Amino acid sequence: MSAERHYHDTRLHGGYEEFEQVHRYEDFTTIDWIQDSIIERNRRLRAARKSNVPYRGPRGEVSLAWIWSRLKNIAHAGQSWFVVTLVGIGIGVNAALISIATEWLSDIKMGYCSDGWWLNQQFCCWEIEGGDENTCDAWHQWSDVMPARWAIYVLFAAAFSFVAAHLVRSLAKYAAGSGISEIKCIIAGFIMKGFLGFWTFLIKSVTLPLVIASGLSVGKEGPSVHVACCIGNLIASMFKGFSRSQVKMREILTASSAAGVAVAFGSPIGGVLFSIEEMSSIFSIKTMWRSFFCALVATVTLSAMNPYRSGKLVLFQVTYDRDWHFFEIMFFVILGIFGGLYGAFVVRFNLKVASFRKRYLGNHAIAEAVALATITAMIGWFNRFMRIDMTESMEILFRECDGASDYDHLCQWPMVNSLFIATILRIGLVVVSYGCKVPAGIFVPSMAIGATFGRMLGIMVKAINRAYPTSGIFAVCQPDVPCITPGTYALLGAAAALSGIMRLTVTVVVIMFELTGALTYILPTMIVLLVTKAVGDFLGTTGIADEMIRFNGYPFLEKDDHAYNVPVARVMRTDLETLPVSGLTVQELEDILGRTDVKGFPIISTDGRRILMGFIERTELRYILDKARNVQDVRPSTPVSFASDSEDHEEVEFSGIAAGPAVGIDEDISMEIMETTATPDVLKMWPWVNQTPLTVSPQLPLEIVMQLFKRMGPRVILVENHGALVGLVTVKDVLQYTMAEHHEPQSPWSEQHFDGLVDEARMLTSSFADDVRAWFRRVLRRS
């Protein structure tokens, strides 16, 4: 098409590669929300008419038909909640099984249990507090020689990643990645066939534990949302009321995404807020209640299965009973700044890696995954925080500093070096690992990075407090109570990093509250996230899910509004395939469908003035032509008419059907309409013509058209000038124009400024770290 050719040689915004993704928009099918709503309305009206049964029979008895209609109404009203319940139970069970498998596979790299090969280290050493492998006789390491243990650890990591990557590439290509970007597009109204299918669900559920156990710097929380939506789609598709209604199906998918986050973080309310803040651009109260109920059912199911046998929904759930001090706000601000810088850095350089991967590694997905897992295992073995699973490391980092929780002297100063190295290495590994062709999320890796940085900062502040307990800012601390809790710094750092990479605020606050159950730390969390958001806004950072949508060329209109200062005439298509309201034969219509691939046809007058008479979808044309042959004698020379007159409306009584818009492909009534309107001399298509399509003037600003697409959800908007058709515009046309013509970054910082900032920050950080280490050595010598 001309619009596609016009934009094909342009570039992606923000310095991406050649804008090759434009043609990819044609791979997506768009849902017409208006048409789907009309079909659903007609069904409700017909159902209401059928249920209008007399209460009494001819002899005054209660009518059985009335009782039956009431029971059908109750079943119909409860069907949605029944489906949501099944979806929640399925998501909870699946999450528990994935957690159990992940724990076992993560531990099998280190050793095995002599009491039973199926037991992980925690269950093998259940009677020993902490499950310490040195005091647990039942748990055996693979070798007593450290190089051999290292080699076995690396081999297991490589094997797990190979199996996962091979299964994904061979059986379900859509199982790769996080899936959040694609689900946002699907909920917004785009269809990706197979993305929520059974094989995607099965392969992603099987490979996700393997990927996490391999040690790759990716998480399972993002893919958990994808798996949850697969479960919601598979269960809802079994019910006719959902499978034939795109609106209802999207409500189930939104509720499923909420439940996916709920079981990933043990946070049902946080899951609902995630679906509002991140996933859905239009969120009704009904959808919110269903999302809350689905998240609640999934969380209760996970709690009942109790995969960790500790009562915790997630491994890093923690409780704090200590308060914070006002002077710590300045250290919280440092955590917020780190979160904002981390998000900007990772998003920026991960897109560079994704571009490199797309250009050079497209045919080497398995080798890439195995190489990344092997390198990560070889490096991570020598750092205690990278050797173990990231959720387990967060559970350790979140602990308070008391005698029982001082894991391997975690609260002591020498641990700072290990934490700093883990932070730097993990950032680099996340940048190169996220996006490889295995199930890969970025929630937990980002939280683990924030937790190591936060714990490092907390230990440093605690060391200062120990050196100067009664001077300066520490004078307000009580002498017999620990003043600084490094675990809370780890928690706030995790929140800052998660907010920085996903650009979420309220959701992260609630998730952290539900993880800790401490109202005391809501205010520090809010302060940290506000600073993170301010830094991200200043640097022009966009959430990594939105950036991946743009990078992959997915058709999605952003929530934020931008001023383009152009009329819709600059964007619309003018070389249109139209149909005359009369004068065509069946053979001519078949020829038009054969030589074109457009999704719909405007109907125009035959007097040469191109007066818009309506719009009909391609799928409806094909449906009518196929079905009409079974109802009437349709020959190639049979005339086709898209116009209606008063006699047609008198012949057909459309009970509960909107007269203006088309009735759509509704199996419940389409055949009845076709039989009623059938005539031997003409094929009447007027019932399927949308006689009141959404139209705008050529002078209407593009921003208003974008609002119409986002709020009303039409597949196409026709452009007419004083009644005459002059063009049409789709979401894909709008995206092609905005990508091609308005690609300047939305940040006051250019690409060169950002790169310069990164170089400067690297040099300053290195110098500052050396100065801080020297200063702390002097302080420790004096103390």
Image (tube, rainbow, N blue to C red):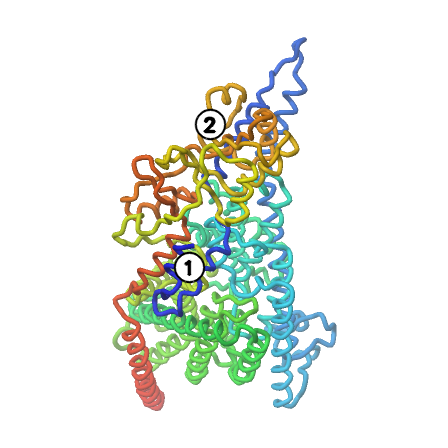
The secondary structure type at the circle numbered 1 is: helix
3D distance between C-alphas at marks 1 and 2: 47 Å
602 or 239, which lies in front? 602
Residue 117 locus on image (x, y percent)? 73, 73
Q: Is residue 475 left or right of residue 222?
A: left
Residue 107 placed where, x, y %? 63, 74
Give residue 756's quadrant in the image.
bottom left
Taking the spot 65% from the left edge, 16% from the top edge, the residue there is 62
Disc 1 crowd, CA 10 A, few/some/many (<14, 14-19, 20+): many
Q: Is residue 531 left or right of residue 282?
A: left
433 over 517 or under it: above or below = below
Q: Nearer the viewer, mark 1 or mark 2?
A: 2
Nearest the eye: 139 or 75: 75
Discs 1, 2 touching: Cβ within 8 Å: no
Residue type at numbered disc 2:
Ala
Q: Which residue is mark 2?
A: 659
* Label 1 or label 2, whichever comes before in sequence order: 1
**In the picture, which quadrant includes the N terminus?**
bottom left
> Could you tell me which residue is drawn at 60 percent across and 52 percent down?
231
SS at badge 2: loop
Find residue 170 and report its horizontal and vertical position in percent.
64, 67
Front residue of this view, candidates 724 and 620: 724
Q: Amino acid at mark 1?
A: Val
- State the image quarter where residue 240 is shown: top right
Residue at 30% over, 51% down = 570
- Look at the image and tell me whether residue 321 can be seen: no
Residue 255, position as x, y percentages in the image = 52, 48
Say if 677 sits above or below 441 in the image: above
Give 582 or 260, whichever is nearer the viewer: 582
Return the residue at label 1: 508
